[in-house]
Amino acid sequence: MEEIYKRRSVRKFLDKPISDDDLDALLKAGMNAPSAHNLKPYEFVLVKDKNTLQALADTAIHSKMLNEAAAAIVVVSKGDNEQTPHWQADCAAVTENILLEAISMEIGSCWLGGYPDLEKTAKEKKVLAIPEDYQIFSVIALGYSALDLKPNDNYYPEKIHYEKY
Ligand SMILES: Cc1cc2nc3c(=O)[nH]c(=O)nc-3n(C[C@H](O)[C@H](O)[C@H](O)COP(=O)(O)O)c2cc1C
């Protein structure tokens, strides 16, 4: 629970690598997310190469922090709406699991949206040589935070309806 409340989007990173074991633990956390019919319609591209991270950072103004990130995990899916109609929900659960495992390891992260922004993801797909028939759901920027971000205090009673809407 602590991780849920501590998590913030980190957009400034220290120049410090993340170990392969820690990156693997993040991927494992992602793969332990719930998945509709347990189909797990996702795959990952793990990026550590600085030139590739820079190329990804250059694909969109809101992705700039990738130029300082130690790594990125790109969550991809065939995005088949017939076979796996819940693929986006599955990929979202995977992404959030990775963010929470990261904070538990004191690694900062930022969720960068992909699908359905096809213009942006086309550029990212080119950088990463992702097959045409795959979609990028999210790019997760990872690194040790250079900032001391305070936890959010999100609670909105007006969003809650009791018993019926
Ligand atoms: C689907 C989705 C897409 C997002 N895309 C971006 C993005 O492209 N760039 C970015 O800096 N943050 C992005 N974010 C992070 C949000 O801006 C952030 O979660 C929000 O401002 C709340 O701040 P917090 O995460 O620190 O609580 C995205 C978050 C989600 C869930």
Image (spheres, helix red, strand yellow):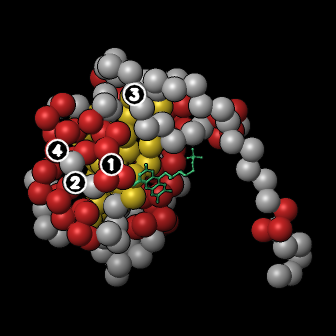
CA separation in Å, label 2 and label 4: 7 Å
User: Which amino acid, mark 2?
Assistant: Thr
Q: 10 Å neighbourhood of mark 2: few (<14), some, or many (≥20)?
A: some
User: Which amino acid, mark 1?
Assistant: Ser
Q: Are marks 2 and 4 in contact (CB under 8 Å)?
A: yes
Give the mark, 4 or 3, whose residue is nearer the N terminus. 3
Residue visible at 45% across and 71% down? 86
Residue under label 1: 63
Give the mark, 1 or 4, whose residue is nearer the N terminus. 4
Choose between 106 and 151: the one closer to the eye. Answer: 151
The dot on residue 59 is 2
User: Which amino acid, mark 4?
Assistant: Ala
CA separation in Å, label 3 and label 1: 13 Å
The dot on residue 55 is 4
Q: Are marks 3 and 1 in contact (CB under 8 Å)?
A: no
Residue under label 3: 13
* Percent position of residue 23, x then y: 35, 29
Q: Are marks 2 and 3 in contact (CB under 8 Å)?
A: no
Q: Quadrant of the N terminus?
A: top right
Instruction: Mark yes or no: residue 103 visible.
Output: yes
Q: Quadrant of the C terminus?
A: bottom right
The dot on residue 99 is none
Residue 104: which quarter of the image?
A: top right
Residue visible at 33% across and 48% down? 63
- Is residue 105 depicted above or below 77 in this figure? above
Residue visible at 51% across and 48% down? 96
Q: Secondary structure at mark 1?
A: helix
- Is residue 133 depicted above or below 13 in this figure? below
CA separation in Å, label 1 and label 4: 10 Å
Report whether the residue tagged 1 is closer than 8 Å to ligand 1: yes
